[in-house]
Amino acid sequence: MPIQILARTISRMSVVDDQEQVRAVYEFVLDDLKVEAVSEAGPFQSLAKCVEDIRKRSDAAICDLNLKVRDYSTFNGAELVAAFYKTAFPAVLCTKWYSASIDEMRPFRRFIPSLVEPEKLDTTSITAGIESCIREFEGKFLAARRPWRTLVRVEDIRPVGQGANFLFVIVPAWNSNQVVKLPAEIVPAPILKELKAGVRLHAKVNLGANSNEELFFEEWEK
């Protein structure tokens, strides 16, 4: 039977994971929630088509992060949840890799209100996650997610790993003693090409974030 979360009626929820056995576990949780589970077997080649198709058959989704394995998908779960968010479709990202994969996730973090570890996924965390999404669609942010315009100081720019460029910045209003590593791609190209150590910028940042992994950056200004 359908459930009501704020103003949304949730009847069916898609489960997006490359492993059938994991999808089956999440389906049991959705059964407890009294929501019909839709097991997404894939494969998915187009992000836009995936979003379109899942929106047609479900009211919300649970997504794993590591989807680009076993030819299941050409995109990861952070990209998918962010794409859902931009269409006002609620989705919970379920992963234990959020700290290890934060560089990969950071460009999409602004559009991921709900991130849950698999062992903590239950009816309560799913409901809370969907509720967080719906509230943000209405412009209502939790303190840890509300973006504020603030100063960002560039400490260094350098390649890390396979030649990918990263910025190392400090956000004094968040924590003046902690350097935050950001993939350069999140900064607009016209601003990025003029950056060097010591440059001060402004961006919207969720200053109420409780950890480095929760931080997101948007609307950069010189």
Image (cartoon, rainbow, N blue to C red):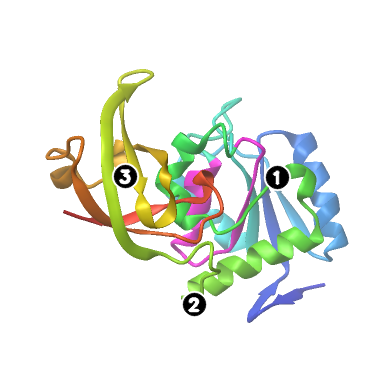
Residue 38 placed where, x, y %? 72, 53
- Quick one: label 2 or label 3, which is nearer the N terminus? 2
Q: How many marks?
A: 3
Q: Which residue is mark 2?
A: 138
Tell me if residue 195 comes above or below residue 91 in the rendering: above
Report the quarter where the C terminus lies. bottom left
- At x 74%, y 59%, the residue is 125
Q: For the residues labelled 3 and 1, say whether their Cβ atoms are less than 8 Å apart.
A: no
Q: Which mark is residue 117?
A: 1
Q: Nearer the viewer, residue 126 or 152?
A: 152
Q: Is residue 74 left or right of residue 11?
A: left
Q: Which residue is mark 3?
A: 186
Q: Nearer the viewer, residue 14 or 103?
A: 103
- Quick one: label 3 or label 1, which is nearer the N terminus? 1
- At x 58%, y 63%, the residue is 90
Amino acid carrying mark 3 in the image: Ile
Q: Secondary structure beneath disc 2?
A: loop
Report the quarter where the N terminus lies. bottom right
